[in-house]
Image (tube, rainbow, N blue to C red):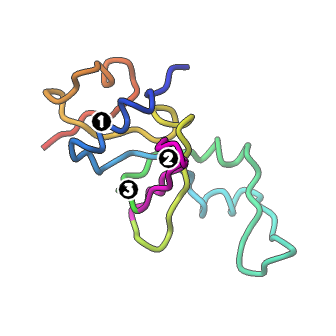
Amino acid sequence: MNRIPEQIFKELILKGVNEFMYESYDHKSAVEHGAKPNTKATDWMDVPDQLKQKFLIWRRGKIRDMAFCPDGGIKKIYVSNKFLYKKVFYPTQFGLTVKPIIFESDDEHGLIKKGLAHKQTI
């Protein structure tokens, strides 16, 4: 599968793209279908990857934080719809599990047609 090159991702952020769709899962449904309690933490459940894929959903969120490498490259970004619960994404996931939401008129690189971005609607 293709992904968004880091340079294009940086361009989008500099142009003001702040909303993203990111891959997550419905935790409540996964727990109802067989997630096991975590023995190390009493308030959390171990959810197998098969259940995460079965209850896959796309959430809408904003960039909450970014970490950079010493050479200026993006190390990781934190995206969430609520400020407290951030999810970490790495450059290899741009366009796969985290996709920018952009207007079709702003899509200079054809990311929407390639399936690497979501189309913004008014």
Q: Sequence-wise, which precedes: disc 3 or disc 2?
A: 2
Question: Disc 2 marks which amino acid?
Answer: Ile
Name the spot of residue 4 as percent of width and height, x first.
Answer: 44, 28
Mark 2 or 1, closer to the camera? 1
Name the main secondary structure of what is drawn in magenta. Answer: strand
**Occupied quadrant, residue 83:** bottom left
Question: Residue, x 72% and y 56% (percent of image)?
Answer: 33
The residue nearer to you, when weighing 71 against 94, is: 71
* 94 over 40 or under it: above or below: above
Question: Residue, x 70% and y 48% (percent of image)?
Answer: 51
Residue assigned mark 2: 57
Q: How far, Cα to Cα, is label 2 from label 1?
A: 27 Å
Label number found at residue 63:
3
Name the spot of residue 90 as percent of width and height, x first.
Answer: 56, 44
Specify the segment rendered in magenta: 65-81
In which quadrant of the rendered image does the C terminus lie? top left
* 77 over 81 or under it: above or below: above
Q: Secondary structure at mark 3?
A: strand
Mark 3 or 2, closer to the camera? 3
Q: Secondary structure at mark 1?
A: helix
Question: Disc 3 marks which amino acid?
Answer: Ile
Q: Residues within 10 Å of mark 1 (few under 14, many from 20)?
A: few
- The answer to whether marks 3 and 2 mark residues whose Cβ atoms lie closer than 8 Å is no
Q: How far, Cα to Cα, is label 3 from label 2?
A: 18 Å
* 21 over 43 or under it: above or below: above
Residue assigned mark 1: 11
Name the spot of residue 91 as percent of width and height, x first.
Answer: 53, 38
Label number found at residue 41:
none
